[in-house]
Image (spheres, rainbow, N blue to C red):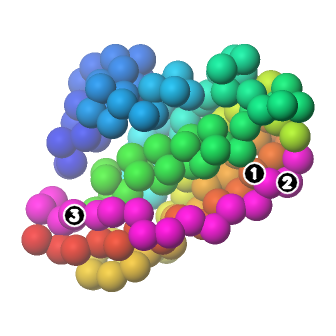
Amino acid sequence: MSQSLSMFNSVGPDAFSKMACQFAPYFSSINPLISELRPNAATVRVPFRKEITNHLGTVHAIAMCNAAELAGGMMTDVSIPSGARWIPKGMIVEYLAKAKTDVTAVASAEGVDWQSDGDKVVNVDIHDCEGKKVFTARITMNVKLG
């Protein structure tokens, strides 16, 4: 089990989310809650706050990119073999609708071969509180095995 997953299971979502923001401070701008974390899946909840809105009063595009990268990155970290390293290489996003509520980013990588070096594509969808998909991302993670 990865060190991150072990810590998540040990301290729980609230404390782990705070620790993740200390490790990578920029993520604190969205006040995330990593509510689910396991190999091939992660869920990050982001509360609607004025600080992350745009000129339209909706969740800013970059706040959603931030949530997608956090969900995709945490999921990648707990999915790769022990001793492997990863880094995001690129992200293709689509803004599908205005987000006027809290949002939830769900990362998924079912079927990804984590046992080999190279680029891996992670899918992240973001939904609003009504279940409407407002954003989608395909994040390319470059994985190097130990």
Q: Amino acid at mark 1?
A: Phe
The disc label shown at residue 65, or none: none
Local crowd size for mark 3, using a 10 Å CA cut-off: few (<14), some (14–19), many (≥20): some
Q: Are marks 2 and 1 in contact (CB under 8 Å)?
A: yes
- What residue sits right under mark 2 in the picture? 96
Q: How much space separates mark 2 and mark 1, taking CA atoms?
A: 5 Å
Q: Secondary structure at mark 1?
A: strand
Q: Main secondary structure of the magenta part?
A: strand
Which residue lies at the image location 68% right of the left edge and 62% below the top edge? 93
Say which quarter of the image contains residue 103.
Answer: top right
Q: Which residue is mark 3?
A: 85
Q: Residue at x 66, y 20 (%)?
A: 51
| Position in image of residue 24 (x %, y %) | 33, 36
Could you say whether the residue bearing mark 2 is in a helix, strand or loop? loop
Q: Amino acid at mark 3?
A: Arg
* Residue under label 1: 135
| Precedes in sequence: disc 3 or disc 1 | 3
Residue at 29% x, 64% y is 86
Q: Are marks 3 and 1 in contact (CB under 8 Å)?
A: no
Please give the range of residues in magenta. 81-97
Horizontally, residue 14 falls left or right of residue 94, namely: left
